[in-house]
Image (cartoon, rainbow, N blue to C red):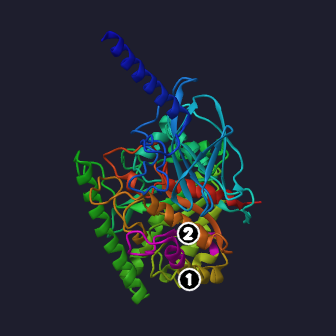
């Protein structure tokens, strides 16, 4: 009896050790009546999105490093040019079949590697191959890649801007800069092909009707950006070989002592209502001036608005000049002010800014399917480039096909962006807010700094939008750059927020699509 028990225990030990060994090297046994290990694909079956385990997002906070020599079992993700042929990973001389998710995105459930060892790897399909990539992993995270084939023609676009915008996170961002915790985000942006970093600098309406616009840092709003934090962000970017764009924006935020609630969702709902009501007032004054350019009350409102906003722009220009910031945006989502009736006010403001700041000037135009900016921004000829905040609705379908998305985007290219470029001859830089949510192509906004239980995550829906955008737009003569909107500042997703379903591309399949396409644009 004792001999039988020993034999059983020995067999169990052999099975356990054998399984660990197979997992460590990613070995898959030949197909047969026996079940395949969980890291091996089922022969003849293309895994579906619901059954395919995407790379696990790191838990909230940074993934801890492990000791050199530790055996790791890491998933692999790759975006390559679309192909109908099987895709194979070659890693340190061994080949592994990749599982197809889409024609441009592939995965392997896990391969054994040793922490601290140099990994040399590439991908191939139907006679095409990517360049070799080299990496060393020191944490149990995914091995991720986005790369063109070695024979993919490069797109020649001098001064093309490849960028990522830091996603709005209130006072979290300046605080992260001052503590030094923001710089791993810069490193991740650079790994995802970024050469530019953008940050959104806010002032706020203290009173919409007057109007009164205030410096958030000066009125004591917690964590508000000031010259110190913005300077840190710009200087840190330059130390890493990155260029910096400073966006500027007005908000209707909750002032100190106005709404003392510890309920984050309730707080964000209250702030959202302030935005809605405030925007109505500004738009009402815009409509009055557009209908009657001689309206004395409307003129007085906008004269005061431009004095107030002009102070914001002068402060921004001084910061940008002092810290060698390469591009400054004169407003983002300030549509009420962006009307032809304010043309001379804008020209005067731009001229005043240029007396202080000598870098590139842009404005961010919020677009929709109804936009007609070719006739709405007659002062655009005073800018260096035009930035498009691309919020058009492409489809109401749950998951439209790539050809459908490409066709929708191409229609907007012809309808909106050809006329805008033809009139002003300014490069167009796109700020893309594509979300990783259900019905992503409809571009319905939700608040990522609150919980959003009614919104479902759809990682491939976001990746499809990026793939379709680049396929439909990369060869356009007016395309001068692309920024993602954007990049959440933490490597994981805090459950009190909804950034895992938002337009952040960090650690999502979309970031690999961007890597691949950015690598195809040669700025020389």
Residue 127 colored magenta?
no
Q: Is residue 248 left or right of residue 354?
A: left
Disc 2 crowd rating (10 Å Cα; few below 14, some 14-19, many 20+) is some
Q: Relative to 139, is 204 above or below?
A: below
Query: Which of the labelled discs sits on residue 469, or is there none?
Result: 2
* Discs 2/1, front: 2
Cα distance, mark 2 to mark 1? 21 Å
Q: Which quadrant of the rendered structure holds the N terminus?
A: top left
Which residue is most to the top?
2
Task: Name the spot of residue 376 as percent of width and height, x first.
Answer: 51, 82
For mark 1, does the 10 Å Cα neighbourhood hold few (<14), some (14 to 19), or many (20 or more) residues? some
Q: Is residue 317 visible?
A: no
Q: In the rendered structure, which segment of residues is drawn in magenta?
A: 382-409
Is residue 224 placed above or below 274 in the rendered structure?
Answer: above
Q: Is residue 472 above or below residue 205?
A: below
State left or right for residue 165 relative to residue 95.
left
Q: Which image quadrant for residue 12?
A: top left
* Coordinates of residue 291 in the picture (x, y in percent): 40, 89
């Amino acid at each position: 009896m004792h001999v039988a028990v020993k034999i059983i225990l020995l067999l169990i030990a052999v099975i356990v050790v054998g399984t660990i060994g197979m997992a460590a090297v990613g070995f898959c046994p030949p197909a047969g009546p026996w079940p395949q290990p969980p890291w091996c694909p089922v022969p003849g079956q293309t895994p579906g999105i619901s059954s395919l385990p995407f790379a696990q997002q790191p838990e909230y906070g940074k993934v801890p490093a492990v000791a050199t020599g530790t055996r790791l079992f890491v998933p692999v993700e790759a975006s390559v040019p679309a192909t109908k042929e099987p895709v194979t990973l070659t890693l340190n001389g061994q080949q592994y079949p990749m599982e197809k998710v889409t024609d441009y995105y592939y995965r392997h459930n896990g391969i054994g590697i040793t922490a601290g060892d140099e990994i040399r790897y590439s991908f191939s399909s139907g006679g095409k191959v990517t360049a070799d990539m080299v990496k060393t992993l020191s944490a149990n995270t995914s091995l991720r890649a986005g790369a063109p084939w070695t024979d993919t023609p490069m797109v020649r676009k001098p001064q093309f801007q490849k960028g990522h915008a830091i996603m709005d996170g209130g006072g979290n961002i300046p605080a992260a800069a001052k503590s030094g915790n923001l710089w791993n985000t810069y490193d991740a942006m650079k790994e995802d092909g970024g050469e530019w970093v953008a940050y959104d600098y806010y002032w706020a309406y203290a009173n919409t009707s007057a109007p009164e616009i205030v410096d958030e840092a000066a009125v004591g709003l917690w964590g508000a950006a000031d010259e110190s934090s913005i300077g840190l962000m710009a200087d840190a970017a330059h130390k890493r070989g990155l260029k910096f764009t400073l966006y500027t924006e007005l908000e209707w935020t909750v002032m100190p002592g106005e709404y003392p609630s510890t309920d984050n969702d309730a707080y964000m709902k209250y702030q959202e209502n302030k935005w809605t009501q405030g925007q109505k007032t500004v738009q009402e004054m815009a409509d009055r001036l557009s209908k009657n350019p001689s309206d004395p009350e409307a003129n007085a409102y906008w004269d005061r608005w431009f004095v107030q906003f002009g102070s914001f722009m002068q402060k921004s220009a001084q910061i940008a000049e002092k810290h060698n910031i390469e591009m400054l945006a004169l407003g983002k989502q300030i549509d009420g002010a962006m009307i032809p009736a304010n043309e001379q006010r804008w020209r005067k403001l731009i001229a005043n800014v240029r007396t202080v700041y000598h870098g590139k000037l842009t404005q961010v135009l919020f677009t929709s399917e109804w936009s007609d900016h070719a006739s709405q921004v007659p002062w655009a000829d005073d800018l260096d480039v035009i930035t498009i905040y691309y919020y058009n609705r492409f489809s109401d379908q749950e998951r439209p096909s790539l050809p459908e998305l490409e066709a929708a985007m191409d229609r907007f290219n012809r309808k909106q962006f050809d006329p805008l470029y033809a009139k002003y001859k300014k490069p167009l830089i796109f700020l893309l807010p594509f979300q990783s949510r259900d019905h992503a192509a409809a571009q319905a906004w939700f608040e990522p700094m609150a919980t959003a239980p009614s919104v479902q995550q759809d990682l491939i829906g976001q990746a499809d939008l990026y793939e379709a955008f680049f396929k439909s737009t990369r060869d356009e003569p007016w395309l001068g750059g692309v920024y993602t909107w954007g990049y959440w500042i933490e490597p994981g997703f805090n459950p009190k927020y909804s950034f895992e379903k938002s337009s952040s591309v960090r650690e999502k399949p979309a970031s690999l699509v961007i890597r691949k396409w950015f690598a195809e644009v040669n700025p020389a």
